[in-house]
Image (cartoon, helix red, strand yellow):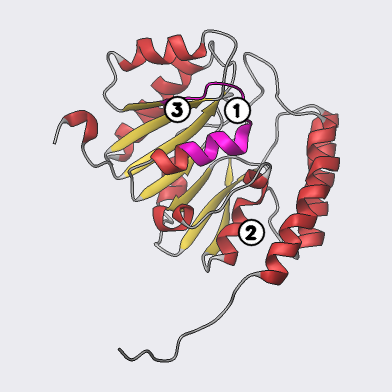
Amino acid sequence: MSENTAKREVSVVVPVYNEEENIPILVKQLKDALTEIGRSFELVLVDDGSTDNSYEVMRDLKKESDFLHLVKFKTNCGQTAAFDAGLRAAVGDIVVTLDADLQYDPRDIGKLLELYEPDLVVCGRRAKREDSFVKRASSRIANWVRNKLTHESIQDTGCSLKVFPKECVKRFKLFEGMHRFFPTLARLNGFRIKEVDVQHFPRRHGTSKYTTLNRVFVSFRDCLAVRWMQRRYLRYEIESEEK
């Protein structure tokens, strides 16, 4: 088995859309943080049809970074699709999700990994969110709506920094917008949820890909779909089987 295809313990999945300035910084930060943690790792970068030079930057970095695993979409398909492709491409038994906007500290991954258990999903929770008032308010409203309709108690489902057992993400059947409900989908599949405070920083480069419409109104529509899934989800225990 070659070094590029060797089994890695941890896969970090990062959707990328027009983040050419952030990618080199992010890759270095992740490499340093994961090397310090001491686990073998890969970074799965999924280019979601970027219109800037994001993919060219990623390919240049891959020439000297054997831990990079690149996936490129033909066209922009959205963050859920990018997460889905990355989760399917990941080879690690532990899967970490993260945005490419440099608003999270990769060193916090170690804090989440310390709590890792095969039946537990560890979710980051932004202790002090460094975003505009409008962005914080609309996210808070959307989070409240999600929790109310899905009977959840997740304080910050919008935080992209999460740690999953690979077995958990293998069971996900994703549709557009479902990345906002990762904890709920995990719980439906029998996994426990724990939230941990993580750091959050202002965006350095690029612009946010979300608007108030994305966070509130689209979220409400998706909540109705998830609530339907919760009510119709198959739940049974096999007492015995004879062959």
Q: Could you tell me residue 201's position as x and y percent?
A: 63, 27
Q: Quadrant of residue 158?
A: top right
Q: Is residue 212 visible?
A: yes
Residue 64 lies, with reference to residue 167, above or below; the image says above
Please tell me whether mark 1 sits on a helix, a strand or a loop: loop
Q: How many other residues sit within 10 Å of disc 3, few (<14), some (14-19) or many (≥20)? A: many
Name the image quarter holding the N terminus. Answer: top left
In the rendered structure, which disc, 3 or 2, sits on the residue that comes first in sequence?
3
Residue sitting at x 32%, y 39%? 37
> Is residue 216 located in the magenta-colored stretch of the structure?
no
The amino acid sitting under disc 3 is Leu
Tag of residue 45 = 3
> Quarter of the image holding residue 146?
bottom right
Please identify the residue farthest to the front as the structure is shown: 243
As shown in the figure, which amino acid type bears the numbered disc 1?
Gln
> What residue does disc 2 label?
184
Residue 222 x, y percent position in the rendering:
76, 49
Q: Which residue is mark 1?
A: 103
Per the rendered image, the range of residues in magenta is 71-85
SS class of the residue under badge 2? helix
The question of residue 79 being in magenta is answered with yes
Q: Rounded to the nearest whole Å, what is the CA distance between mark 1 and mark 3?
A: 17 Å
Q: Position of residue 93 (x, y in %)?
A: 34, 51
Residue at 39% across, 91% down: 240
